[in-house]
Amino acid sequence: MIELKNGDNHLVINEDCGLTVQSWRHRDIERLVFDEARIKARRTSGIPVLFPTPNRVKDNHFLFEGNHYPGIMHGQARFERFEITERSPNSCTGVLRNSVGSEMHKSFPFLFELIVEIVLGESGITWNFAIENRDTKNLPFGIAIHPYIKKQGLTKIVCTAEYAMHNDENQLPDGNLEPSVLASVTNVDALNLDTVFYSDKESVTTKLYTGKEIYTFSGTDEFHHTVIYTPKGESFVCIEPQSCSTDCMNLFTKGFEKISGLQVLAPQERIEESVSIKIL
């Protein structure tokens, strides 16, 4: 485990489980819901990094450039061990290299390097990502974080996305867009969402009001999507900044290239992007 500290901000990160943040204490209050049993069941908890297939993949399968591949919900990277290459009191950097014969390569046969730097500020967290295609074929991917934020009392939400992506009967986007229901501040208790919110103009910013504090979720220009999950009766809300839609690979192949948000790197190409959560 890796512990980061910055003033009264404290993180615990598991480098053996995809750099998942298992605890975030700020002002002596635990901010996350984390359940080890969910991790053992290969589900999500805390704040995992989702790569290369954030959220659901239709029939656990995708087609890309004429080839068929298995698709894992939320991606295999969240279960992989990251090599820690840099440490400081308030930051750490981990590297995941997908190579022939690795467990991840069996389900995602593309050679790549994923670098994740987690920086703990005085009032928030930033994830800096660098993805490099080390293969001879194009690399398709999306990347996201999946925070389970603990409710601290009355909880409300607002999002800058203009649209919600319409889901089919399997909770998968079908390519149709609807007006967002979160354009104004809305009580989470009135919602039951598991929905991709999308902006075709700019990266999405979401604000979560809970108790006496405001969380802001944002990303660089790649993050035009955010999945918002508000299950009834739970002690958490998930605000998931994503570089892509749920089922992005299959949406892309169906011709919904822009709204899928799928990123494709040519051989040896590299890209950097980031997301952050701040508490005001």
Image: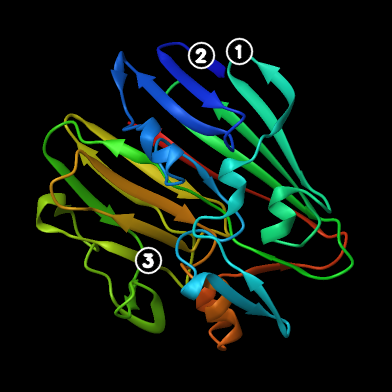
Which residue occupies 32% across, 28% down? 31
Hey, which quadrant is residue 269 in on the image?
A: bottom right
The residue singled out by tag 1 in the image is 89
Residues tagged 2 and 1 counted as in contact (Cβ below 8 A): yes
| Local SS, label 3 | strand
> Tag 1 or tag 2, which sits nearer the N-term?
2
Q: Is residue 121 visible?
A: no
Secondary structure of the residue carrying tag 2 is: strand
Q: Secondary structure at mark 1?
A: loop
Q: Tell me which label, 3 or 2, sits earlier in the chain.
A: 2
Tell me the kind of residue under disc 1: Pro
- Relative side of 142 to 264, left or right: left
The residue that mark 3 highlights is 196
How crowded pointer 3 is (Cα within 10 Å; few <14, some 14-19, many 20+) is rated as: many
Q: State the image coordinates of residue 25 (x, y, percent, origin top left).
A: 37, 19
Q: Which residue does the numbered mark 2 point to in the structure image?
A: 5
**For the residue carrying disc 2, how many other residues have a C-alpha within 10 Å: few (<14), some (14-19), or many (20+)?**
many
Q: Spatial distance from mark 2 to mark 1, Cα to Cα?
A: 6 Å
Q: How many other residues sit within 10 Å of disc 1, few (<14), some (14-19) or many (≥20)?
A: few
Q: CA distance from mark 3 to mark 2?
A: 33 Å
